[in-house]
Image: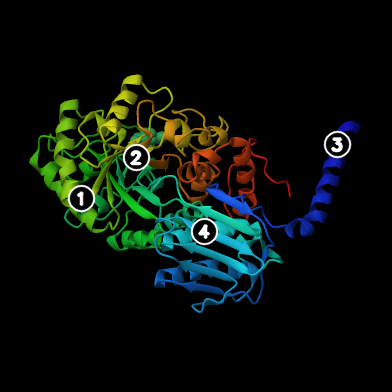
């Protein structure tokens, strides 16, 4: 007992010491490389820059550069309490500059020293990513919504950075449970912190159709009227959806809409009896089984339906991709599946979009330019992996979403209160410690277009649930998509990841405090 008391006292004393030392610690700027995702190159040196009441944010370049400046000001003003005017005269302590043709579509350079901070990029997206780096170089309290003491120091030196992959995605399943526009926006803001640039929305499944389609109105009004567990569900009007697309674009994310076909279609089949081979509409479905529904491949009306849906969805989509699902079509014969994909992929092309499909699409004939999204596991059969690798050798690009690595709906441990475990338990280290460039045997590294972390929502009902499952694993997926392979290493990563904890606290993100990560104790 005395020993336990003694160690309790020691812990208490250590706590008091940490609290007492905090102001001094805060005066030491965050090292320039303590950023997630790890920057491509970091050269520390020179004096830090201090943001003060007199700091201005100056922007040169397009109107979009100015919007990035305003975004930065909006992040910094509440916690610093400083006015931080955004000007165009080039004389600010923080300068955002567009210089054509140097850093690629998303890269940037950040120079910091006593005289100021300059973020240079070739395009506004690069400035935006540079701003995310700058946020992480400031104390975590910068993320709070009330005035904090500072000081607001940024270490001296240079960061030069650009992404490993052009496709860095997160998927949200808004079908199994519906999420409001406000909830989706909150997730977009969280994705932007880690330089994710694609938001894949899983807009239809057995349990709910979530996007208004004018030519088939019952899809949303009836097919969207429930969800897993029988709640009221919901759907996005076209105005709602445009607002999501607009908001995502303001954070440099492209929305990738998915209509899952030909399976996962009970909500559509329930809404229109004619879509069923037997002409009988099934009831709405609120359970969590998969693989029991299929569109009627031989019927002509099936293709009228697909054409209308793809046309209306493509018109809402400024982005390049349209995802047609294609997974778990267990109720569709192989011949029908192939025939269906042969007819439907050209419809996507007709409306100007590029097909993405879950990797089962490689069991049919992927259209030229199509991407396959791999969601297998370490122990997926060799034949299935070989089929995907062969398609990759033949030109099909790959998005890697291995379920036993970055399915954000997998439980971390058996005690995780949310999520599923069919792909295994996925702790933080496991979700980070793999290389997308050398993941799938026989697939050329050049076929890999990027990484995506899907979040299926059978057990997920609100933003707190999303955040608990996404954080910290989403940060690892983002790093795998952005950072050069040479920066990969768990020992370094876990320290950079640990530094995110206080930021998430400041942002009100309730994350899983994995024992694998050395979270700061004060
Ligand atoms: C498999 S992954 C599915 C989804 C489920 C998920 C649950 C994939 C392409 N299909 O329908 O929601 O597992 O983890």
Sequence-first disc among 3 and 1: 3
Image quadrant of residue 30? bottom right
- Where does label 3 land, which residue? 7
Q: Rounded to the nearest whole Å, what is the CA distance between mark 3 and mark 1?
A: 64 Å
Which sits earlier in the primary sequence, circle 3 or circle 2? 3
Q: Earlier in the sequence, mark 2 or mark 4?
A: 4
Residues 223 and 109: in front is 109
Q: Are marks 2 and 4 in contact (CB under 8 Å)?
A: no
Report the front residue among 155 and 237. Answer: 155
Asked whether residue 170 appears in the rendered view, the answer is no
Marks 2 and 4 sit apart, C-alpha to C-alpha, by 49 Å
At x 41% / y 69%, what residue is drawn? 64
Q: Disc number at residue 286?
A: 2
The nearer-to-camera label among 3 and 2 is 3
Q: CA distance from mark 2 to mark 1?
A: 25 Å
Residue lying farthest left?
Answer: 300
Q: CA distance from mark 3 to mark 2?
A: 52 Å
Residue matched to label 4 = 109
- Structural distance between the alpha carbons of marks 4 and 1: 40 Å
State the residue at coordinates (64%, 72%).
Answer: 81
Q: Nearer the viewer, residue 66 or 259?
A: 66
Cα distance between the residues tagged 3 and 4 = 48 Å
Q: Residues within 10 Å of mark 2 (few under 14, many from 20)?
A: some
Q: Secondary structure at mark 2?
A: loop
Q: Which of the numbered marks, if any, corresponds to residue 198?
A: none
- x, y (%) of residue 497? 60, 44
Q: Secondary structure at mark 4?
A: strand
Q: Residue at x 57, y 59 (%)?
A: 134
């Amino acid at each position: 007992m005395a020993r336990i008391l003694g160690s309790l006292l020691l812990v208490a004393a250590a706590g008091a010491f940490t609290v007492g030392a905090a102001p001094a610690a805060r005066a030491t700027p965050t090292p320039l490389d303590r950023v997630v995702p790890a920057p491509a190159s970091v050269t520390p040196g020179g004096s830090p820059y201090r943001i003060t009441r007199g700091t201005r944010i100056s922007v040169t370049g397009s109107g979009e550069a100015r919007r990035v400046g305003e975004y930065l000001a909006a992040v910094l003003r509440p916690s610093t309490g400083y006015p931080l005017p955004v000007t165009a005269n080039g004389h600010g302590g923080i300068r955002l500059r567009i210089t054509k043709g140097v850093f690629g579509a998303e890269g940037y350079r950040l120079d910091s020293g006593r005289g100021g901070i300059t973020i240079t990029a070739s395009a506004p997206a690069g400035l935006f990513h540079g701003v995310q780096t700058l946020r992480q170089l400031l104390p975590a309290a910068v993320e709070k919504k009330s005035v904090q003491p500072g000081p607001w120091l940024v270490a001296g030196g240079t960061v030069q950075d650009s992404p490993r992959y052009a496709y860095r995605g997160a998927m949200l399943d808004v079908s199994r449970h519906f999420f409001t526009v406000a909830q989706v926006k909150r997730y977009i803001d969280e994705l932007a912190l880690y330089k994710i640039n694609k938001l894949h929305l899983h807009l239809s499944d057995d349990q709910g159709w979530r996007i208004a389609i004018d030519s088939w109105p019952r899809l949303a009004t009836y097919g969207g009227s429930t969800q897993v567990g029988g709640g009221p569900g919901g759907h996005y009007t076209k105005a709602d959806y445009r607002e999501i697309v607009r908001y995502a674009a303001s954070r440099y994310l492209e929305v990738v809409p998915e209509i899952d076909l030909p399976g996962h279609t009970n909500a559509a089949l329930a809404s229109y009896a004619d879509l069923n081979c037997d002409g009988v509409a099934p009831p709405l479905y609120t359970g969590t089984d998969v693989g029991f529904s299929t569109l009627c491949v031989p019927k002509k009306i099936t293709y009228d339906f697909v054409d209308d849906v793809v046309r209306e969805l493509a018109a809402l989509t400024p982005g390049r991709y349209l995802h047609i699902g294609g997974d778990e079509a267990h109720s569709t014969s192989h011949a029908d599946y192939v025939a269906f994909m042969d007819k439907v992929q050209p419809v996507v092309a007709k409306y100007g979009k590029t097909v993405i499909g879950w990797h089962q699409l490689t069991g049919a004939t992927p259209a030229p330019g199509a991407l396959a999204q791999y969601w297998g596991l370490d122990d997926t059969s060799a034949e299935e992996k070989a089929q995907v690798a062969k398609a990759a050798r033949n030109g099909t690009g790959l998005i890697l979403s291995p379920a036993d690595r970055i399915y954000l709906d997998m439980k971390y441990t058996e005690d995780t209160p949310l999520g599923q475990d069919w792909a295994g338990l996925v702790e933080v280290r496991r979700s980070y410690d793999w290389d997308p460039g050398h993941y799938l045997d026989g697939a050329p590294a050049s076929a890999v277009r990027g990484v995506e972390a899907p979040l299926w929502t059978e057990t997920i009902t609100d933003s707190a649930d999303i955040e608990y499952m996404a954080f910290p694993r989403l940060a690892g997926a983002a790093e795998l998509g952005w950072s050069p392979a040479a920066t990969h290493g768990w020992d370094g990563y876990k320290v950079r990841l640990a530094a995110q904890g206080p930021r998430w606290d400041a942002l009100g993100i309730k994350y899983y405090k994995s024992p694998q990560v050395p979270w700061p104790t004060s």
